[in-house]
Image (cartoon, grey):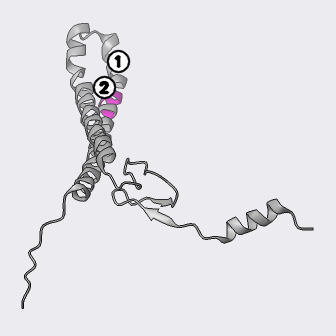
Amino acid sequence: MNHPYLETQAVQRAAPARVVNCPICAIEWPSPVACCACGYDFTIESVHGAMARFRGARISAVTMQACGAVTIALIAPFFWLVGFTPAWLILAMFLIPIQVIGGLTMIVRGAARLRTATRHLRAARRLGQLPSARIVERRS
């Protein structure tokens, strides 16, 4: 027996889906998608959403780096405030390495995110620029 649902499923599986590549982040998307996760709009080929998203990502990455630097820099003022008592020095043996590792991790992750956002932002700017003008001479 032929069932209409099974026949439509077979037809849908047999038809190859067209794939669209994002020119900014190079992610492959199925054809009916309207925009990429980075913000590139496939329907009108606009990069404005992607550029706004990557500008925000750059600001977030710089903020992450600054927080990591402040985390490391706050080690000395902390001991200046609480003093160098034996109990705090024992706690410092565990606290300082954790604080330094955490701060360095934030700095490195912020640098990686900044690099990625900057690379994608440059690609979006290149797509958004008008092509250079060409002079065509007609020889008769």
Residue farthest bottom in this picture: 140
Mark 2 burial class by Cα count in 10 Å: few <14, some 14-19, many 20+? some
Q: Quadrant of residue 106?
A: top left
- Say which residue label 1 marks: 90
The secondary structure making up most of the magenta span is helix
Q: Quadrant of the C terminus?
A: bottom left
Where is residue 41 drawn, in percent x and y?
38, 51
Q: Quadrant of the N terminus?
A: bottom right
Span shown in magenta? 96-101
- Indicate the amino acid at tag 2: Ile
**Was residue 40 drawn as part of the magenta stretch in this picture?**
no
Picture residue at 60% right of the left edge, 70% below the top: 16
Q: Please tell me whether residue 139 is drawn above or below residue 121 in the rendered image.
A: below
- Indicate the amino acid at tag 1: Ile
Cα distance in 3D space between marks 1 and 2: 10 Å
Q: Is residue 16 left or right of residue 107?
A: right
Per the rendering, the mark at residue 15 is none
Dot in front, 1 or 2? 2
Per the rendering, the mark at residue 96 is 2
- Looking at this view, is 7 or 112 the one in front? 7
Where is residue 114 drawn, in percent x and y?
26, 44
The number of callouts visible is 2
